[in-house]
Amino acid sequence: MISFLLAYITLTLFAMMFLGIYGVATRSNLIKKIIMLNIMGDAINMLFILIGYRLVFPVFPPIYEKHITFREFLSRAVDPVPQALVLTAVVIGMAMNILLTTYAIQFYRLHGTVDARDMAEILRGEDG
Amino acid sequence: MKRDAIVAIFFLLAFLFVSYAVTVKNVLGLGEAELRPLGEFYLSHSFAHEGLTSHSPEVVTAIVWNYRGFDTLFETFVFFLAIMGALSVLRLTEEQAKIVREIEGREPHRRMDIIVRATTKLVVIMIVSISASIALHGHITPGGGFQGGSAMAVAALLLFAAFSKFTLERKGLTLGHTMSAYAIGLALIMVTVLAPLFLYGGKILEINLLPGEMGLFNLDVGEYTAVTFGFLTVFLILGIPEWIFKNVLRREMND
């Protein structure tokens, strides 16, 4: 049962990831592209956390406490490495998001469109 | 449309392949009772070696600021660069800023009705205290500067929605203030990172030389301030209403 649940969650996350890549590749609206990029990033982060999970009961967070022995701590605690990775990836993802949104908004203010195809034409027109 | 269908079929095939690899072959190693050797190393060494590591019982914080300190430090600078990029794209000249201030000063005192305002006040107080506890206890309990800062940014967004940006600016939360607070957070991080070099004769970022948990605490507080006010700075600029911004930009184009 638990392995079925794990496989189900993992496949859902992978489906979200591929959905995100598909959206980034096929939509031409920049805002939609940014939203799909976010969905993809969140799915990948969740997947990382899931990889660090450990199938024991009861499972501990990776925080050492005085009232449990060190051996028990080692046999119960989840993997801290993916958590440390995701922790910074989330904030950097948010910063990247801010930058992309800012560019899209500024382009809309200057040219009145956020469509990637129109954007290419406008930029080509400015060059020539 | 035809190309879209081809792309969709291709992605579907890739998804089927990945799901076969993950569920049948278990390439990711999901759902195992055993720990990976690297994770076990960090769990057993983060607190065992007194004096060599950063005195943190919380292994994630120990990894983020001790084993992988340079990565986190430079990620702070990536964040800094992203915010500076946003600020430089949305930058206004001094004349434009003056016009924006004039138009915003003439704005009526708009806000939502009393139910929304009272609820938002309660929720914001709760979020701020929770985010402070996340950040200040980051070296003992789950949490840290990044997480606390992100939670605090959410509180700021709630205030923006319920009270409008103009009310906050009239109360003193202007762009200059948030940017100074951001600079103070970054300065605290830099001082803590450089302190072992000048005070204790160690290397850069060797925070285990600092007394007690001071190094981790300072870094957490610095990161908390930096992330909170970095986000707030960008929100303040993005919060300038569209029609004001267009007005200002058009006026420049007409000149």
Image (cartoon, coloured by chain):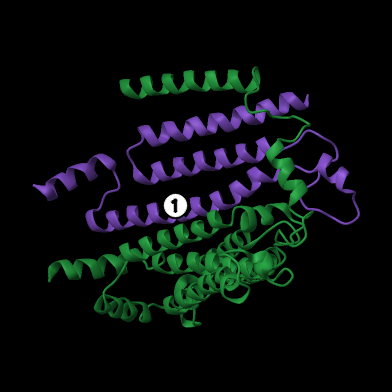
Front residue of A4 and A64:
A64
Could you say which quadrant of the image residue B25 lies in?
top right
Q: Residue B217, position in %: x, y?
A: 67, 69
Q: In this view, does A4 lie above or below B53?
A: above
- Residue at point 33%, 52% (across, down): A104
Q: Residue B26, position in %: x, y?
A: 65, 22
- Residue at point 39%, 41% (across, down): A33
Could you say which quadrant of the image residue B234 lies in?
bottom left
Quadrant containing the C terminus of chain B is: bottom left
Give the total number of marks visible in the rendering: 1
Tell me the chain of label 1: A
Q: In this view, does B92 lie above or below B53?
A: below
The residue where tag 1 is placed is: A97
Q: Residue B36, position in %: x, y?
A: 71, 35
Task: Describe residue B169's horizontal placement relative to residue B245 as left or right.
Answer: right
- Letter of the green chain: B
Instruction: Give amino acid for label 1.
Output: Asn
Q: Chain A is drawn in which colour?
A: purple
- Residue at point 74%, 25% (across, down): A3
